[in-house]
Image: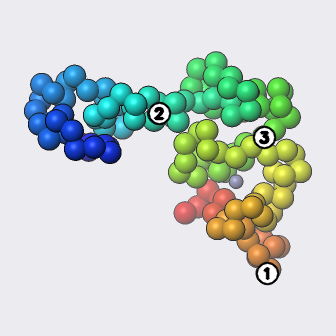
Amino acid sequence: MSFPTHGTGAISDAGSANALQELPYDTPWEVYFDDRGSHDRVARLKQLQCVECGWNECNKKINKLKEHVETAHGLHFCDVCLASRKVFPCEQRLYTSRELQRHMKLGDPDDPELYNKGDQRNKRTPSWCTDKP
Ligand SMILES: [Zn+2]
Ligand SMILES: [Zn+2]
C-alpha cells in the first residue's frame, strides 16, 4: 500500500484504518489518496479520452477510442506503443498516417530519447517500439 501525497497533513500522519476508509481509494492500483484533488487528477489521466476533442464515451475500450480518433480526426495510435509504452492513455501519441509510418521506421524527431539515428534508420521497428522487451 502506498500514499501518494504532497503534504504531511493530519490524515497521512494518522494512517489509522478508519481514516483510510474515508479516503478516495483507487481499486486497480490499490493506492490511497489523501486528497481528493490528486485522486481526481489521476482518474482523469487514466480515463480513455480523445485528447483532440475530449470525447470519452469509449467505455474504457481502447479499440473504440482508436476508431474515434481515426474517423473523427484522421489520426492513429501506434499499436505497439499502446501495448508497450508505460504511459497514461492520454499521453499516448496520435499520428497521421505519414507520421505513423515515420514513427515506426525512425521514432519521433521531437522525442530525442526515442529517436533512432544514423545506422538504425534501416531497422524496421525501433527497439523501444517492439513487442519484445
Ligand atoms: Zn475526438
Ligand atoms: Zn510506437
* Residue 95 sits above or below residue 109 on the image: above
Left or right: where does residue 12 sit relative to residue 61? left
Question: What amino acid does circle 2 point to?
Answer: Arg
Task: Report how far apart the C-alphas of labels 3 and 2 lie in the structure.
Answer: 25 Å
State if disc 1 and disc 3 touch (CB < 8 Å): no
Task: Tell me the residue at 76%/76% (across/down).
Answer: 117
Mark 3 belongs to which amino acid?
Answer: His
On the image, the x and y values in percent for residue 98 come to 89, 51
Quarter location, residue 68 = top right
Pointer 1 local density, CA inside 10 Å: few below 14, some 14–19, many at least 20: few
Image position, residue 32 (x, y; %): 28, 35
Q: Earlier in the sequence, mark 3 or mark 2?
A: 2
Q: CA distance from mark 2 to mark 1?
A: 41 Å
Choose mark 3 or mark 2, whichever is in front: 2
Q: How is the image coloured?
A: rainbow
Left or right of 17, for residue 45: right
SS at mark 2? helix
Of the 4 image quadrants, the one containing the N terminus is top left
Q: Are marks 2 and 1 in contact (CB under 8 Å)?
A: no
Up/down of 118 relative to 5, above or below: below
Mark 3 is surrounded, within 10 Å at the Cα level, by few (under 14), some (14 to 19) or many (20 or more) other residues, namely many
Name the one closer to the observer, 53 or 122. 53
Image coordinates of residue 37 in percent, x first then y, are: 40, 31
Residue drawn at the location 67% of the way across and 50% of the way down: 80
Q: Secondary structure at mark 3?
A: strand
| Residue 131 percent location from the top left of the image | 61, 56
Q: Residue at (81%, 51%) from the top-left corner?
A: 100
Q: Residues within 10 Å of mark 2 (few under 14, many from 20)?
A: few
The residue singled out by tag 1 in the image is 119
Residue under pointer 2 = 41
Identify the residue position indicated by label 3 in the image.
76
**Residue placed furthest toward the bottom:** 119
